[in-house]
Amino acid sequence: MITDRLIEKIIDMQNPTCVGLDTLFDYLPDDMKAGVTNFDQVAERVFEFNKKLIDTLYGIVPSVKVQIAYYEMYGAAGMKAYEETLKYAAEKDLVVIADAKRNDIGSTAACYAKTFLGETSVNGIAQKAFPADYVTVNGYLGSDGILPFVEECEKADKGIFVLVKTSNPSGAEVQNVNLENGVPMYEYMGGLVEKWGESTVGKYGYSAVGAVVGATHPTEAARLREVLPHTFFLIPGYGAQGGNAQMLKSCFKANGLGGVVNNSRGILCAYKKQGGTYYDAAKAAAEAMQKDLSDVIGAMGK
């Protein structure tokens, strides 16, 4: 099961880090940006940047998260770079999360699920569009927008991460509103996520239906960890957004398991602070993050 595989990689590496490949062209070093005048050239350089990062980091971190918006803005060429990045990361045995925050209802949700998790048949020949191990999903359309994704998870051994308590400050405008019974919206959504994942629980006790829970909200994260025993967390907000290891400790159980922590700009752009090559700086930043997390969380699964 995919979440078991992610957990085993985290245990083996003693590192719950997910590198966010939110690769804006402006993040590239000046020499890689020089002479670029169109989207095709942008896409070529972005993939070159990503490829070198993956080559440098795949033995250190268990997973990457590729945020689709940073590629869509460069048109069809950018989407080609997105596809190539997903596939190359998979070749290096990384657990690949497509950060697309997709959803709709019924047949449209089924199309999104096939896009990132499953296959689409063309005259009887099955093909994959943007293959990933997980995709992020917006659950606020309810069950008929989620169950097509769960079906693909069961069919293809894939997973999803559903938005529950996001790292952005204004998320509280919706997610912290109390329902009539006094339960905040984020906790109610978490309960749905726990229910949606019941059929996919693996040997470590976590399902393929995970939750996005921001590191910047430790009180809410602690509550969610308490009431969602079978839900694995994707934890954004570490680093540039203000989250730190101590704040996200509540996302993990006593055995050091329970989530994977995303860091994007803090790794992609580390060279701008540290100097040197972007990939050596990224490696140093990833290793520093691993130590920071392990010092606070403790041994993972051991």
Image (spheres, rainbow, N blue to C red):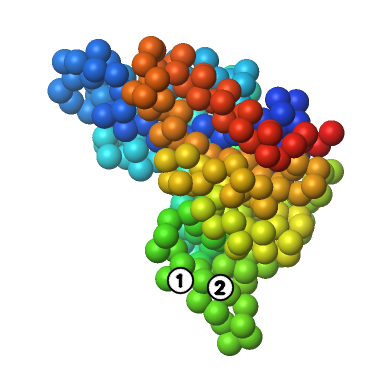
Q: Quadrant of the N terminus?
A: top right
Residue position for label 1: 174
The front one of 83 and 5 is 5
Callout 2 amino acid: Met
131 or 191, nearer to the observer:
191
Q: Is residue 201 visible?
A: yes
Residue 185 numbered tag: 2
* Quarter of the view holding residue 189: bottom right
How dense is the environment of label 1, judged by Cα within 10 Å: few (below 14), some, or many (20 and up)?
Answer: few
Give x and y (percent) for residue 8: 76, 32
State whether residue 2 appears in this view: no
- Answer left or right for 228 relative to 64: right
**Residue, far bottom:** 180
Q: Tell me whether circle 1 and circle 2 mark residues in contact (CB < 8 Å).
A: yes
Residue sitting at x 34%, y 36%: 71
Where residue 196 sits, quadrant-wise, is bottom right
Q: Earlier in the sequence, mark 1 or mark 2?
A: 1
Q: Amino acid at mark 1?
A: Val
Q: Position of residue 146 (x, y in %)?
A: 58, 60
For numbered disc 2, what is the local secondary structure?
helix
Judge whether 283 appears above or below 258 on screen.
above
Residue at horizontal 75 percent and vertical 37 percent from the top = 298
Q: Residue at x 57, y 30 (%)?
A: 289
Q: Residues within 10 Å of mark 2 (few under 14, many from 20)?
A: some
Q: Disc 1 versus disc 2: distance between alpha carbons?
A: 7 Å
Residue 6 vertical placement versus 223 (above, below): above
Instruction: Give SS at disc 1.
Output: helix
The one nearer the camera, 294 or 13, is 294
Determine whether 157 is above or below 91 in the image: below
Instruction: Reply above or below: 101 against 92.
Output: below
Q: Does residue 231 appear to the left or right of 73 in the view shown?
A: right
For the C terminus, give its image quadrant.
top right
